[in-house]
Image: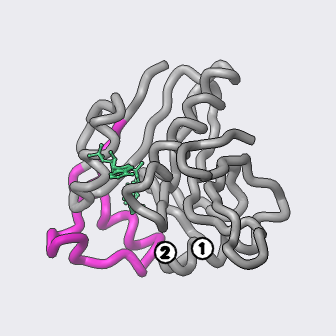
Amino acid sequence: MSEAPSGITIRPLTQQDRTWVAQFLDEHWKSTKIVSRGQSYYGHLLPGFVASIPDDETGAEEPIGLLLYRQEDSECEVMTLDSIQRKSGVGTALLEAMKQYALENGIRRLWLITTNDNLDALRFYQKRGWHLVTIHRDALNESRRLKPQIPIIGLDGIPLRDEIELELTL
Ligand SMILES: CC(C)(COP(=O)(O)OP(=O)(O)OC[C@H]1O[C@@H](n2cnc3c(N)ncnc32)[C@H](O)[C@@H]1OP(=O)(O)O)[C@@H](O)C(=O)NCCC(=O)NCCS
């Protein structure tokens, strides 16, 4: 467990978190299914980190951010990063926890897919040292076959078409 700025606690997910993680994914991504590079994954079964603050009344842990990843050999793919208390350091703290895990476990490369409409994410990752690697043009056509909930029009009215791969080498 680590303490991030402004009373935000970051800890690794456990099996006990799976139920709320499934609900969280349904709410934020319309499914527990996560599609990346033509593959589908059950997000609530993946490892990850939760950011939380204490509930005002009960003091119980209140999740305000979630990062899920999958590990393959010496690489980790960040599968989702969500903050529900934006611009207060949650996303950065979760990404930092991922990086710390990677450094401690011999992971040489972190990578992720975002979509062409997600200008916020492109800014966010690049400012934190990540590089754009590849544009997988029209990859969302394939993703929609696996997850029909993916909309045709994305953020800011931008047609949702391409997967953009970013990486951080360690
Ligand atoms: C991308 C995302 C995870 C960032 O999460 P976040 O919690 O807002 O991230 P942070 O608060 O750490 O940083 C966001 C910005 O707020 C700023 N910020 C952080 N604390 C702040 C504070 N106390 N006051 C003012 N600004 C602050 C940061 O400097 C940062 O700006 P920058 O990117 O221009 O440097 C979030 O926007 C999100 O959940 N998006 C939707 C899901 C998504 O698209 N995920 C990525 C898909 S791969």
Q: Secondary structure at mark 1?
A: helix
Front residue of 104/134: it is 104
- Residue 157 horizontal side relative to residue 104, left or right: left
Left or right? Give the position of 46 relative to 33. right
* Amino acid found under the numbered disc labelled 2: His
Do residues under tags 2 and 1 come within 8 Å of each other at their CB atoms? yes
| Residue on which the image places disc 2 | 28
Residue 149 or 104: which is nearer the viewer? Answer: 104
Range of residues picked out in magenta: 137-166
Rendered position, 8 above or below 92 = below
- x, y percent for residue 85: 46, 65
Question: Is residue 47 visible to the viewer in this orientation of the structure?
Answer: yes
The percent coordinates of residue 20 (x first, y second) are 71, 73
Quarter in which the N terminus is drawn: top right
Quadrant hosting residue 64: bottom right
Identify the residue position indicated by label 1 in the image. Answer: 24
The reply to whether the residue tagged 2 has its Cβ within 8 angstroms of ligand 1 is yes
Compared with residue 121, is residue 30 higher up or lower down, i.e. above or below? below
Residue 57 falls inside the magenta stretch? no
Rendered image quadrant of residue 65: bottom right
Name the foreground residue: 147 vs 153: 153
**Numbered disc 2: secondary structure:** helix
| Residue drawn at point x = 64 percent, y = 66 percent | 63
Toward the viewer: 153 or 141? 153
